[in-house]
Image: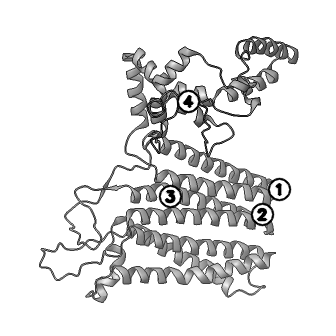
Amino acid sequence: MYDYIAEFSFAAICLFIPSVPLTHCLGLVAHSPRSAKLKYLLLYPVKGGRHHFIFQIISWGIWVASIFVALPVLIRTHKAVRATHAEILSGSAATGAVFAELFMIKSLLVFNPRCKPASDDSSSPRWNTSLLPSKGAASGAVIALGLVWAALGGSLLLATEYLQDTHSKEVYFLLAALCLLVGATTTHGLGGSLRHKQTGPFTLELGSDVDPRQPDPVTTWRFFQPFRGGAFFVATQAMGWALFSISLVCLCWLLVQVVAGVAYCIRCWALITGSVMFCAQLFLGMSIWTWKDHSVAQGVAQTVVQVVTHPAQEAASWTAVWLPILMMYSPVQVVCTALAISFMFAPAAFAAAFWVGSLAVYYAVTLPGAPEHTGRREWAPIQKWCHKHMETALRAWFGNVEVVREGTTPFDPEDKYIFGYAPHGLFPIGAGFLPYIPAWGQLLPGIVPATLVASVLFFTPG
């Protein structure tokens, strides 16, 4: 199996080592002024801003190191280099070549030229900005780079099963951990910064000249910003960093097991860890697109202040929004959950006696009148309250609700009609909303529908 790993490593070395200068030349051609002389072209790495310069240095440094590491593998004989050393050298060179290429791409994404303003009479050429990517495209590309890093880390983990030497496995695990760290920080830090550049004193417009006297584009994005960015951003960030931590712990555990010589089923653990790494990148990338410039903690604090200062008003508002939905969707789920928990944590005889007694009282109130045939289990106070608050709740949850009637033929309240409702899920809850929306009574006066469902639903608690 070593031969296959060596072939893949050799192919990666031959592909990515030449691609780094080629990518650099493509960026140079895209960004360089048409009238630029050779001295300006040689200064390209230092003309694209601080981040461009840093990524260029990192890329070229890793590229040179990869060449030196790859040379013994490319020109080796079996007598000159041991197989275990060749595993380490080929894997490190291939990983380094991929790293160099990804950092070179990052440098092109953050290219921020420093040209003379149009009013300047200087003969210095202006760098071309017409091909710079938009904020969305740049951040999307960075997210894709993070996924590539995660895939590279997972591939290194899978390769460890076929390595002959413990030291080779240790190196591959460390390289996988490096892929995880660089990929996550790149996706979160650079991807978020590119996505959320804000207009300020200086905004780089495509095809425009850049005044070096103006500051960089401002952004309110920060690498560490706890409880900022909106509830969905905080939730996806928490999931992404939790998966990141789990994958890092799995890597450390695998490394300890390999060093101790007790590792087993490395392929299974490598697949799990690699999948978790990839999912972590997906969640971090998703969170970038959901970020909003406000603090969740501040919103929670404002809600707490309102509850403390106006408790009755806030309680009424909360009830009007939440209770109609909970009344429609949650009773069956709540009862089933309570039933399962009672039999899990209480003696079976006690739980059975409790439910028999409770349901006997419940059905004594709800079964009279054959609701499975009449569709009626009505309590006037609850209906009145639902008529008052149902539309408010639906607008709060779904954004808008509207009843539209086609045709003008009047309906006789004394006749019987069948209204079709589609599509619906297992529980046609949406049909139960309609009678409580004021617009229904205005468009169809006197028509009070009874929702037709399977008879069994009238015998389930709730």
Along the line of sight, the residue nearer the viewer: 407 or 349: 407
Residue 5 x/y as whole percent: 74, 75
State the CA–CA distance, disc 4 to disc 2: 59 Å
Residue 327 x/y as whole percent: 59, 25
Q: Earlier in the sequence, mark 2 or mark 1?
A: 2
Would you identify the image quadrant in which residue 65 lies? bottom right
Along the line of sight, the residue nearer the viewer: 175 or 25: 25
Q: Give amino acid for label 4.
A: Ile
Would you identify the image quadrant in which residue 365 lies? top right
251, above or below 371, in the image: below
User: Residue at horizontal 38%, vertical 22%?
Assistant: 305
Question: How many numbered discs?
Answer: 4
Q: Give amino acid for label 2.
A: Thr
**Secondary element at tag 2:** helix
Residue at numbered disc 3:
187
243, above or below 58, in the image: above
Residue at numbered disc 1:
261
Residue 147 visible in the picture? yes
Q: Give amino acid for label 1.
A: Gly
Residue at numbered disc 2:
166
Question: Dots 1 and 4: beta carbons under 8 Å?
Answer: no
**Secondary element at tag 4:** helix
Q: Earlier in the sequence, mark 3 or mark 2?
A: 2
Would you identify the image quadrant in which residue 31 lies? bottom left
Residue 401 x/y as whole percent: 46, 39
Along the line of sight, the residue nearer the viewer: 407 or 454: 407
Residue at numbered disc 4:
325
**Secondary element at tag 3:** helix
